[in-house]
Amino acid sequence: MLVQDIKEAELVLIGIGNEMQVKLQTLKEIPNFSEKLSVLEKEQEKEWLIPFLIRYYLRKELHPEIIRAYKNLRKLIDGKNYFIVSLSTDDLIREIGFKEDRITLPCGTYHVLQCEGNCGGKLFSIDEVFWSKVCGWIEDKVPLKELEEPVCPDCGRPLVVNQYGQPAYHEGGYLESWERYTKWLQGTINKKLCILELGVGMEFPSVIRWPFEKLCFYNRKSSFWRVHSSLYQLSEEIKVRGRSVKEDPLTFLNK
Ligand SMILES: [Zn+2]
């Protein structure tokens, strides 16, 4: 049992993949979201607003299944020495009370901005006045034409969300936490380690899947859990210590 493996482990490593992430499809089921989205898609010079529209609708109360899964996960690892690597960009994990210094988000976030050209390698927080206008537009209180794209104070290019996929993705947003993570990993050698993969498919396999398997292979005291609705298979090398669960992680954690 997973509960048992976690209980017996000295350290717990968790990888979170896109089965735990809020899907664009889910957002499109919200009438106001899809209405606003189609407005932006039609008015091309306002397309830059799409990530901000998404950010607005990522608010936690709209995604109870994911929030509940995270809360259950937190209960599961309560009191443990853990580290979480997440490929998700929805940032819902930050709302649950996991230790901030035990999370790394290599794919970035909707909550921090960078220069589109990453001219000075800087990160920018979202301006409050700008954000309240965005909210006003989404809530039909501010006309669209009043919204102006935020620009880089250094070079005048647009400010965009600090996320993987940007042509000049500024990785500085997560590198510090990534260093903490690699240091933490060094401390797992010869320790009883429980590795848990939740909904991690083959997106960026070199970030979670492959290194996690390698870790399990070399650490003979480890246990390994792979939970995924379709990509749940384990490689030969880790089958001895591994369990595979053919289920999406939300169902798995919310049982
Ligand atoms: Zn710039």
Image: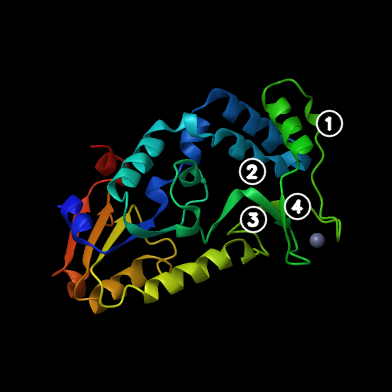
Tell me, yes or no, whether the two marked residues, 3 and 4, touch with CB atoms within 8 Å: no
Total tally of numbered discs in the picture:
4
For residue 51, the mark is: 2
Q: Earlier in the sequence, mark 1 or mark 2?
A: 2
Q: Are marks 4 and 2 in contact (CB under 8 Å)?
A: no
Q: Which residue is mark 4?
A: 159
Q: In terms of secondary structure, where does tag 3 sit? A: strand
Residue at 78 percent across and 29 percent down: it is 144
* Visible residue check, residue 118: yes
Quadrant for residue 170, please give it.
bottom right
Residue at position x 45%, y 44% in the image: 97
| Percent position of residue 66, x then y | 39, 39
Q: Where is mark 3, residue-wise?
A: 162
Mark 2 lies on a secondary structure that is helix
Question: Which secondary structure, mark 1?
Answer: helix
Front: mark 3 or 1: 3
Near mark 4 (Cα within 10 A), the count class, few <14, some 14-19 or many ≥20, is many
Mark 1: give few (<14), some (14-19) or many (20+) Cα within 10 Å: few
Q: Nearer the viewer, residue 191 or 85?
A: 191
> Label 3 sits on what residue type?
Asn
- The answer to whether any part of residue 104 appears in the image is no
Residue that badge 1 annotates: 146
Q: Quadrant of residue 248?
A: top left
**Nearer-N-terminus badge (3/2):** 2
Q: Residue at x 76, y 31 (%)?
A: 133
Q: From the viewer's perspective, is 246 left or right of 108?
A: left
Q: Position of residue 209 (x, y in %)?
A: 35, 66
Instruction: Give the residue drawn at x 61%, y 26%.
Output: 35
